[in-house]
Image (cartoon, rainbow, N blue to C red):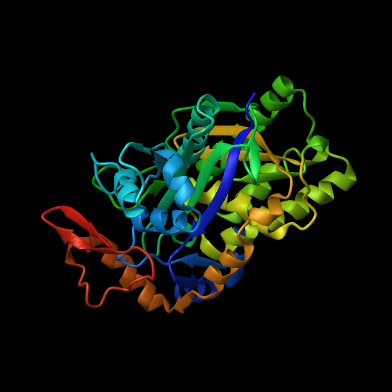
């Protein structure tokens, strides 16, 4: 069988960030509630001239070259921050990146889970067409509202992945277990720009689905926890992954427990700096692990737990390829995060409110990025450059 997986991976988040210690003080909360209790230090602030299209395109342009443009004939965007009820955001990204018009351009939705479904569809397609490549983008803006219980778990950004045969970074294994259940733990009606969430229920369902799928994974694949080098989790906030892992940690040897907990911390580092990415969260966790864990080796298997409220989850593994570390963009991503501008709580609140009136963007004062930007909306049409 053809080995298929992630050949290249990129990440983008806008150049503005909020210090959650400052937010805690502004909201009358103890900073430790955010930095320790929730496990977050900063969250991305999304200016009005950026959306899932600009963020997705900015993430993808880091990794696409002319060879990719010749071979990519499918673009899959996973998001729950859609910009149109009809037209796919993948269509805009295809044009911005200069990809062939002889391509499929699709947008997928199921809360935070859809990126994993897109990745699996890409794997299966490339398995049948090993000469082709697929661009998978998971892009979102997490919004719960100002001074709400969910405010500390906001954020945004995009992860872009090129799926190909004989991948340089990791292969995607055929050992998935998955489940779906109609649960009202998180949703966003069509007339709302902010999500509705039952945080306690969502945490309970997340932990329960992980345990159920872990038991099924072990049974179906005849694997034990000691055969896995790390777990990466969907991280709406970093403490969520720890709560899930602690449920099965006693199954591992003492040495393995230490290894898994160290790798969990490495997988959380980017999320602590960016916040919630919704569909991209679990893949930012994976990217953080690859960038920070110095003891991973080719051939190591890593478990991936993807969760989307509502609720759907999948557990599967990936295998690191020879010399994978040479193709992980560590320096680029560290520079991206280090160069961001910290904004005041007042500025963050002003920017948050601007998200509601995109048609009123003044292109002369918009907070332009050095990459792709949303210039404005004319007659209902989004204008990008």
Estimate the x, y position of residue 37 in percent, counting from the top left: 62, 60
Q: In the displayed structure, would residue 125 be above or below residue 256? A: above
Q: Would residue 225 be found to the left or right of residue 217 on screen? A: right
Q: Is residue 102 above or below residue 269?
A: above
Which image quarter is the N terminus in? top right
In the rendered image, the vertical position of residue 305 relative to residue 213, given as above or below: below
- The residue at the point 89 percent across, 45 percent down is 254
Among all residues in the image, which is located at the extreme right? Answer: 254
Query: x%, y% of residue 203?
Result: 56, 43
Whether residue 62 is visible, yes or no, is yes
Coordinates of residue 188 in the picture (x, y in percent): 34, 44
**Residue at coordinates 56% horizontally, 74% vertically from top-left?**
338
Q: Most extreme residue toward the left, as rendered?
A: 379
Q: Is residue 206 visible?
A: no
Q: Is residue 84 above or below residue 129?
A: below
Left or right: residue 51 versus residue 182 is: left
Q: Which part of the image, by quadrant, shows the C terminus?
A: bottom left
Of residues 128 and 360, the one drawn nearer to the viewer in this rendering: 128
For the residue pair 80 and 87, the one nearer the viewer reads as: 87
Left or right: where does residue 105 sit relative to residue 6? left
> At x 49% / y 74%, what residue is drawn?
340
Residue, x 29% and y 66% (percent of image)?
Answer: 353
Q: Position of residue 266 (x, y in %)?
A: 70, 57
**Side of 192 relative to 67 (left or right):** left
């Amino acid at each position: 069988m053809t080995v298929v997986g992630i050949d290249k991976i990129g990440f983008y988040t806008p150049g503005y960030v909020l210090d959650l210690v400052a937010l805690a003080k502004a909201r009358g909360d103890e900073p430790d509630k955010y930095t320790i209790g929730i496990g977050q230090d900063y969250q991305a602030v999304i200016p009005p001239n950026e959306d899932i299209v600009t963020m997705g395109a900015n993430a993808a342009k880091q990794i696409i070259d002319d060879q990719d443009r010749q071979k990519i004939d499918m673009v899959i965007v996973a998001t729950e921050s859609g910009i149109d009820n009809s037209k796919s955001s993948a269509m805009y990204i295809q044009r911005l990146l200069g990809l062939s018009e002889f391509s499929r351009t699709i947008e997928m939705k199921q809360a935070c889970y859809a990126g994993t479904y897109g990745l699996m569809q890409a794997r299966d397609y490339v398995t049948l067409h090993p000469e082709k490549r697929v661009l998978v983008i998971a892009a979102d803006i997490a919004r719960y509202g100002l001074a709400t219980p969910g405010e500390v778990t906001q954020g945004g950004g995009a992860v872009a992945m090129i799926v190909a045969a004989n991948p340089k970074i990791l292969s995607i294994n055929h050992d998935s277990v998955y489940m779906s259940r109609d649960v009202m733990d998180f949703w966003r009606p069509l007339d709302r720009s902010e999500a509705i969430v039952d945080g306690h229920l969502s945490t309970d369902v997340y932990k329960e689905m992980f345990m159920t799928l872990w038991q099924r994974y072990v049974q179906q694949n005849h694997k034990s926890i000691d055969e896995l080098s790390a777990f990466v989790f969907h991280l709406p906030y970093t403490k969520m992954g720890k709560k899930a892992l602690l449920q099965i940690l006693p199954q591992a040897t003492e040495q393995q427990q230490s290894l898994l907990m160290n790798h969990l911390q490495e997988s959380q580092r980017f999320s602590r700096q960016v916040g919630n990415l919704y569909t991209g969260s679990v893949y930012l966790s994976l990217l953080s692990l690859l960038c920070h864990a110095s003891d991973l080796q080719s051939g190591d298997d890593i478990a991936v737990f993807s969760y989307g409220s509502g609720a759907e989850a999948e557990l599967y593994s990936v295998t690191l390829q020879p010399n994978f570390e040479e193709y992980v963009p560590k320096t680029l991503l560290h520079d991206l995060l280090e160069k961001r501008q910290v904004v005041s709580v007042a500025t963050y609140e002003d920017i948050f409110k601007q998200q509601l009136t995109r048609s009123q963007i003044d292109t002369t004062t918009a907070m332009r990025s050095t990459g792709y930007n949303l210039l404005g909306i004319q007659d209902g049409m989004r204008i990008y450059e």
